[in-house]
């Protein structure tokens, strides 16, 4: 409560101190920013949007019934706000949909014990409630697999099989949540020079080897007819990180039911089996596949530009709308979607005139490889594999993205675009007292602004406080509404709205880097 009080006091102070002063060239338009702050801080809807996207419709796995319902709700809201050109824009093929309908897991012998566990996406369920023994078949190398095949062939039918070693768990001496310190931000603002193309070679080779071994191991377990393949979460403290364990293509080889257990619960079963104490589990895992439509969609809406000449130029904002399936996709990326929706609502509600058209794009299929934004960029702007560009590429001014959880904006990653630094430095000034002070020439990866950069469009991701994103919520069962920080969400929406407003009314478009070369192979 105390924290909320301070935050409110801070916001009220900000809304009254900004003067409508004469401005230096290139400076932010403080009258407009005053209106944006007033709408975003005093009439916010961001937490209500957030609760609908997570509590009501989450999780939003691409091509699941949930994400379709969430998209219908979202386009309904956008129409209610009187945005123009609101529509779902199809792209594809993505592949079949999947959802978990029911799940329970218990140890029933030697002692009754409830298990924290989740199925991996795109894996089949068990055939109803299955009661069976657990078997430890340790496989970490090709050699282990050969031995396991010799030792266990014909004996694993209907069993719950554990193949991973005991997770090593260490105490957490640091708090889950973290905000950037001034020293960390200063460090982030310095340019990094990479260690050369081979810096990651070992890691990639290791990753490939593990993947190949897993394919063979999966085939062995499937041929055996196991009841389910159990694995420990890479997380601990009852938190489960879980993504996909099967294919979105119905023609691919099937997977057995695959289930991720809390690492401590996996550990208990493992230690019992090591003592040769029989363990009986009871698991009910009911999953559904959806093959009616293999295509997905992006969610699009606009505020048309007010200037006859500039209205066919577009400023875009966006983030990915899809999530993984164990939590409700609150921080990843309900937060970014809610902030972007709130930003465009603020702009519309404030009645501010914007010369260029402002467009929101909420992408699906991000978690499976930036698929939705890549498809949108290819349809509208150009093909990054050939660098054949379309006329719209020259008209898209800039793209702003949010996809790093609930933490407030501390600055911008410039993606190597030096020319934009003086401009953004000016635009950040009205937000210095809200903690936004840092520009870094560095790139950040892993999300949808890359799709835009790959065809030479200035695409930016904001620097955000981590809060407990990597330590707790990212792709986990704990990615829930409670992890969302309301003051941070309001700060983000106001900053995005202001940057969009300033971009849309600037005389020239945002400076561009030289066009990148074609990337025949997918680089991200
Ligand atoms: Zn993610």
Image (cartoon, rainbow, N blue to C red):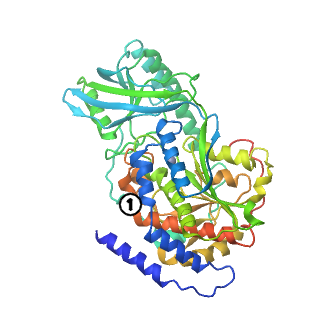
Question: x, y (%) of residue 23?
Answer: 64, 85
Farthest residue toward the top? 154
Q: Is residue 317 left or right of residue 70?
A: right
Quadrant holding the N terminus: bottom left
In the rendered image, which quarter is residue 406 located in? bottom left
Rendered residue at 46%/79% (across/down):
14
Farthest residue toward the left? 111
Most foreground residue, 213 or 379: 379
Rendered residue at 51%/70% (across/down):
185
Question: x, y (%) of residue 394?
Answer: 78, 58
**Which residue was labeled with disc 1?**
177
Q: Is residue 237 above or below residue 228?
A: below
Rendered residue at 45%/60% (across/down):
46
The answer to whether residue 385 shows anywhere in this view is yes
Q: Is residue 250 left or right of residue 416?
A: left
Most foreground residue, 183 or 465: 465
In the rendered image, which quarter is residue 231 located in? top left
The answer to whether residue 523 shows anywhere in this view is no
């Amino acid at each position: 409560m105390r924290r909320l009080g301070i935050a409110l006091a801070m916001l009220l102070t900000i809304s009254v101190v900004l003067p409508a002063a004469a401005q230096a060239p290139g400076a932010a338009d403080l009258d407009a920013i005053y209106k944006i702050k007033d709408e975003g801080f005093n009439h916010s809807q961001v937490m209500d949007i957030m609760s609908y996207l997570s509590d009501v419709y989450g999780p939003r796995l691409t091509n699941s019934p949930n994400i379709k319902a969430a998209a219908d709700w979202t386009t309904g809201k956008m129409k209610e706000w009187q945005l123009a050109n609101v529509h779902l824009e199809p792209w594809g093929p993505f592949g079949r949909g999947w959802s978990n309908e029911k799940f329970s897991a218990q140890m029933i012998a030697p002692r009754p014990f409830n298990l924290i566990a989740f199925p991996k996406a795109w894996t089949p369920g068990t055939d109803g409630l299955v009661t069976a023994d657990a078997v430890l078949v340790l496989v970490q190398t090709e050699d282990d697999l050969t031995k396991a095949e010799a030792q266990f062939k014909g004996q694993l039918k209907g069993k719950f099989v554990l193949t991973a070693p005991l997770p090593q768990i260490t105490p957490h001496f640091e708090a889950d949540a973290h905000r950037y310190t001034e020293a960390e931000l200063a460090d982030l603002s310095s340019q990094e020079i990479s260690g050369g193309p081979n810096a990651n070679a070992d890691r990639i080779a290791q990753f490939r080897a593990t993947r190949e071994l897993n394919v063979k191991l999966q085939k062995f377990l499937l041929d055996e007819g196991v009841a389910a393949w159990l694995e420990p979460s890479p997380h601990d403290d009852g938190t489960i990180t879980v993504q996909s364990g099967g294919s979105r293509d119905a023609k691919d080889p099937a997977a057995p039911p695959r289930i991720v257990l809390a690492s401590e619960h996996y550990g208990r079963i493992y230690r019992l089996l090591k003592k040769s104490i029989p363990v009986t589990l009871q698991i009910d895992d009911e999953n559904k596949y959806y093959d009616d439509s293999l295509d997905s969609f992006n969610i699009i809406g606009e505020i048309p530009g007010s200037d006859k000449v500039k209205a066919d130029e577009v400023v875009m904002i966006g983030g990915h709308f899809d999530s993984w399936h164990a939590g409700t996709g609150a921080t990843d990326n309900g937060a970014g979607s809610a902030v972007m929706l709130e930003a465009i609502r603020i702009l519309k509600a404030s009645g501010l005139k914007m010369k260029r058209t402002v467009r929101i794009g909420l992408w699906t299929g991000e978690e499976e490889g930036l698929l939705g934004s890549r498809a949108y960029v290819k349809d509208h702007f150009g093909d990054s594999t050939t660098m054949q560009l379309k006329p719209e590429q020259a008209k898209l001014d800039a793209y702003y993205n949010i996809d790093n959880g609930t933490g407030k904006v501390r600055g911008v990653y410039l993606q190597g675009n030096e020319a934009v630094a003086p401009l953004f430095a000016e635009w950040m000034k009205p937000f210095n007292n809200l903690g936004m002070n840092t520009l870094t020439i560095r790139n950040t990866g892993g999300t949808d602004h890359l799709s835009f950069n790959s065809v030479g469009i200035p695409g930016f991701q904001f620097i955000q406080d981590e809060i407990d994103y990597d330590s707790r919520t990212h792709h986990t069962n704990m990615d829930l509404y409670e992890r969302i920080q309301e003051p941070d969400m309001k700060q983000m929406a106001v900053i995005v709205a202001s940057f969009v407003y300033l971009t849309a009314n600037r005389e020239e478009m945002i400076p561009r880097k030289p066009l990148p070369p074609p990337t025949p192979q997918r680089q991200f």
